Image (cartoon, grey):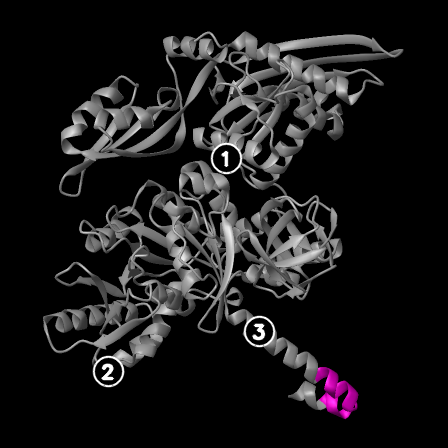
Amino acid sequence: MKMLRCAWQNGPRQSNRWLRHLSNQIWKRSYSSKIRNIGILAHIDAGKTTTTERMLFYAGKTRALGEVHRGNTVTDYLTQERERGITICSSAVTFPWNDHRINLLDTPGHIDFTMEVEQSLFAVDGVVVVLDGTAGVEAQTVTVWSQADKHKLPRLIFVNKMDRPDADFDKCVADLKDKLETQPVCLQYPVKNEDGVLAINDVITLERLSWHQKDLGRSYKNVKLEPSDDLRQLQEKRSELIDQLSGLDDELADVVISTESFDKVDNALIERALRRATTQQKVVPVLLGSAYKNVGIQRLMDAVNSYLPAPEERNQIYDCFGTEVAGKVFKIVHDKQRGPLTLIRILRGEIKRGMRLISARGQAEVVSKLYEPLADEYREVSAVQSGDVVICAGLKSTVTGDLLTSSQSALKNAQKRLKQSQGNNTAAKDEEDDELDESDELFAIDPQIPDAVYFCSIEPPSVSSQTAMEQALKQLQREDPSLRVSYDSVTGQTVLGGMGELHMDIIKSRILSEYKIDVDLGPLQIAYKETIESPALTTLSVEKEIAGSKQSVSITLEVVKNQAEMFSLDKSPENLPNLNTLRPRILQVLRKGSISALERGPRVGGQVVETQIRLHNATIGRGTADSFVMATAAQCVQKLLSTSGTRLLEPIMALQIVAPSERISGIMADLSRRRALINDVLPKGERNKMILVNAPLAELSGYSSALRTISSGTASMTMQPCGFSSMNSVDESLAERRAQGLE
């Protein structure tokens, strides 16, 4: 008011300008408070995509219910997704619900596409984790939960498939406590009539919710429960909920103490306390339903609006940008008509059509068009506010994970403000460390990409298709950072690295269907790693005349077992005087050349790990080119690796196999022939058992088909990488023969 009074004293024109600015700021703040950016995460086949389809249908975005088995869903729009009935690429959709705008990212559930989930979590403020009511917490559920933990995201749980006879809600809640070590609070409980039709008892309102199937679940009725055993049990659950929340929320605790009764606590007060506890990640609300049978979806969307945070309630670290534009790229797709489309989460400021943006890499881009996301459909808009998600066309050099700002100076000023705020921060040390991790991630140029598990060669059908194939791979790699493309100078082949058999198969299928190139993939090879057997020390001296200029390098290096730093200086008294004479630029060249030699080991060409290179001495002749120094360092390391010898490390997979009890003995006998280590056998329901096992990836080629044969199609399996393990000499020889194509 004081600023407004000053503006009025300076004249009506300035007063009107101030009023417009003030109303604009209020509008932006109210707009942002109505946005919910959420991701939907789950194990494969838990029902993520079906749940998303119901949300779009009830919000009025679609006119018909899409079904995964019919291949007509909105978010699974790739040909490969519709053929296989699984989500491969994360997709964004926007829809309104009860005066809010929900931006939802439907993510893959298969382990091969974990990178898609990781990139999507940069763009959301909360997640909905879908559980299969018949299976509880599964392997990939644990993986995506840990990813959400890393990003500090508030969560809701939706227990799906509760209409099925073998669904067990209590077991799912117990799994959440035991396997995920979280604090679930149940807001609903299932109830079925004599015909097995699912209804829901609401703990907060003490109502029974029943969905009408004649209108495909668009409407439902809520009826207050009459005095009965069901009502008394629900009242007990409500009192337990209030008791649990009052220990976490001061406002609710004060009301409980003053009224001395749980019954007099208002529903709105419970919901406010639940929202605060959820956004602070103290509890996880649990809801239930059946997406396929159209039950419980509307209440799930209500819970998203009520309990998950708005953009302004999270990510205060982005305040360092002030009013400048800041956006994080979390996905890139290629459209045949529109070219590369970049999905951006706007962290601060406003992005407009025609705006010039600068990436953290220093590359300038111009936004030609803006679109509202709806999977592979697009509606053009002129501007998008902070907190929202938008698709930008015209960005040619931007890659996944890039931070975009309005100018280079805005980026530098943001980094300076962030360092100042961290320097003035007097919070606990672990909170400071968390903030430093977030700032490193925010300004990081390259995303963290997991190591490839498989690799294979790729060949075009003809020489004339080579350029088109390279362009296709470049576009696919821009979309999918976990796809690795390299050129093997020894064999002269292009080599692909991926996260699994399905991942590689999808890449080949997409090149054929989208780029019309029938490429040939070589046999899948295991991505072995190598490590040295024993330390070794050697000196390499090279002299050569190139174009009339004498090139001379003498270098002494040592390789030792070390999992920490890859390159170091041996600062012993006899070596220190020489090392001090080397310029920092020369040391950097020596480091780069030495480390590059670790990318290809001498046995099967695997990356050399757990190895440190120590520089003892180096003499560089005057006028020697940096490239010559780098090549000499690489040759010296290769000589050392051959001298010391290397051992192979093979990738190990963690498997969860669920099968009927009578099939377990046959499955375990087969696993013993595959060098597997069986960790545990647990009961899974009344008739099934679950085997937890670690097995070498080399022994699991085609295992899903073999498992179906052994169990007569009754067993299911999930697997994910769990590190590397050393091999015995017999298995090493066999691996070498496979790598050479002799097996």
Report the front residue among 715 and 170: 715
Part of the protein shown in magenta? 6-18
Location of the N terminus by quadrant is bottom right
Asked if 372 appears above or below 110 in the picture, the reply is below
Report the Cα–Cα distance between label 1 and label 3.
38 Å
Q: Amino acid at mark 3?
A: Arg
Examine the image and state in which quarter residue 217 appears. Answer: bottom left
Query: Circle 2: is it few (<14), some (14-19), or many (20+) Cα within 10 Å?
Result: few
* Residue 77 spot, x, y in % from top left: 50, 47
* Residue 373 spot, x, y in % from top left: 56, 57
Asked if 85 appears above or below 100 in the picture, the reply is above
Is residue 61 left or right of 250 when viewed as pictured? right
Indicate which disc residue 450 carries: 1
Indicate which disc residue 264 carries: 2
* Residue 600 spot, x, y in % from top left: 57, 18
Residue position marked by numbered label 3 in the rendering: 29
Query: Circle 1: is it few (<14), some (14-19), or many (20+) Cα within 10 Å?
Result: few
Q: Main secondary structure of the magenta part?
A: helix
The residue positioned 40% from the left and 43% from the top of the image is 109
The residue positioned 71% from the left and 61% from the top of the image is 353
